[in-house]
Amino acid sequence: MTHVQQNSFSSIQKEFPILSRKIGKHSLVYLDNAATTQKPLTVLKAMDAYYRLHNANVHRGIYRLAEEATLAYELAHQKTADFIHAQSMREIIFTRGTTDSLNMLARMLSSSVEKGDEIVVSQIEHHSNLIPWQQLANAQKAALKFIPLDKKSGMLDLSRIDKIITSKTKIVSIPHVSNVLGTIVPIKEIARRAHKVGAVVSVDAAQSVPHMPVNVRSLECDFFSFSGHKMYGPTGIGVLWGKESLLNHLEPVSFGGEMVREVYYDRATWNDLPWKFEAGTPPIAEGVGLSAAIDFLQKQGMEKVRAHEKELVKYAYDKLFALKNISIYGPEPKFRSGVITFNATPVHPHDLASLLNEKGIAIRAGHHCAMPLATLLNISASARASFGIYNTQQEVDLLVESIKKAQSIFSGGKRAVV
Ligand SMILES: Cc1ncc(COP(=O)(O)O)c(C=O)c1O
């Protein structure tokens, strides 16, 4: 079977300096995009120029540099709002990343949860969308309930959703895309059920925003969290989007810096949105980097990004599926984003990752920050290849050939060239 490599991104690797690196004598094949993505030159240059030419603290000075820095930082909010189709930049809070956004949100919502209430998550959560809610539920003596995984289809089982999301449910927090299974979760369907009982809906979108067009309004959620570094931007910045009508009624959870309007010895009042939720000196250079990453993605077109990764994941899935002694976790390719988690018997995933590294191939091995899901799947570890805009079918071919060789070595074949 010959596949024609969709070539809309055929020359894009050139825009990522790190991708021309050698690992030993091999070209780097970077397949750990769910953990973090590499950065295009435009992002590196934008951050470099910011520090060389414009660096100052924001919202404070009235001199030229401070005005430029403030403008760039505010523009980053506006671009982010446009990118996810938010109503306005007042709804865009910059955080340190998805984990920070979700922890912050759990603290912001804590007073709305009382003893006997329920919080709903799913069985496929990354720890970052499990532990904050687990801690909140424990602290308030509320119950934490789970939308189950249908292990056969790799999708969430929504058949009993009315029993799980009930009149006691105050918060539903679900992933848009599973970082282990690649499953795309039907957010709108779950949000509609949650809203029927008056619950608020938070979405962990760490694995969707970089890979598909998103529109927070058509998803019908209330809060939406994602990370800059997984979308070709810098580390140290993330986003918490919230509906303005809800954010207006929530109290800040971090204090100091430009989040205040007036301060007295015994009390303080808060700045406008979104600044009331951004305490201290914010991630300014990172905001500039995130702006450049959004420009980069928009230039490619998110529909095209999705089409490229969909084709690649189908190609990789079919090739991996054809191997002997392979277990692939999660749904059919058409229901997943660009993540494939698997075990290639008899090779332990850590051994596999280390053998692939000898070929310059970077994949992830372990529990992928989702230990309860690994337990549910009856595995202690797995290997994960996750794709981005710059990956190609040739790289998938190399991955699959190298897995085959690793299997042969561990089945008693010769340990020679992997
Ligand atoms: C689904 C999901 N949620 C949350 C996170 C946490 O993101 P960060 O480490 O950027 O805070 C990740 C990162 O792997 C993820 O995949």
Image (tube, rainbow, N blue to C red):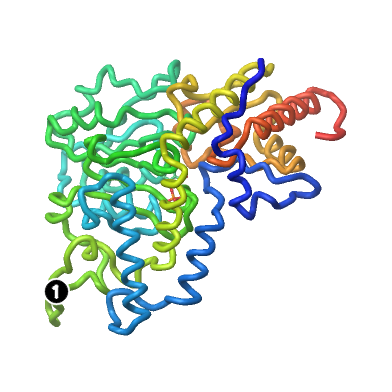
The residue at 19%/48% (across/down) is 243
Q: Is residue 143 visible?
A: no
Q: Is residue 219 visible?
A: yes
**Residue 324 x %, y %:** 69, 16
Looking at the rendered structure, the secondary structure element under dot 1 is: strand
Residue 10 shown left or right of residue 64 in the figure? right
- The C terminus, quarter of image: top right
Q: Which residue is mark 1?
A: 268
Residue 214 shown left or right of residue 166 in the figure? right
Looking at the image, residue 364 lies above or below residue 375: below
The residue at 34%/78% (across/down) is 66
- The N terminus, quarter of image: top right
**Residue 169 x %, y %:** 18, 35
User: Cβ of disc 1 within 8 Å of ligand 1?
Assistant: no
Q: Residues within 10 Å of mark 1 (few under 14, many from 20)?
A: few
**Residue 177 x %, y %:** 40, 34
The residue at 35%/58% (across/down) is 95
**Residue 385 x %, y %:** 59, 35
Furthest residue in direction bottom, as rendered = 63
Task: Report the label total.
Answer: 1
Image quarter of residue 74: bottom left
Image quarter of residue 402: top right
Residue 309 shown left or right of residue 165 in the figure? right
Image quarter of residue 321: top right
Mark 1 is on which residue type? Ala
* 15 vs 116, nearest the viewer: 15
The residue at 56%/57% (across/down) is 41
* 14 vs 146, nearest the viewer: 14
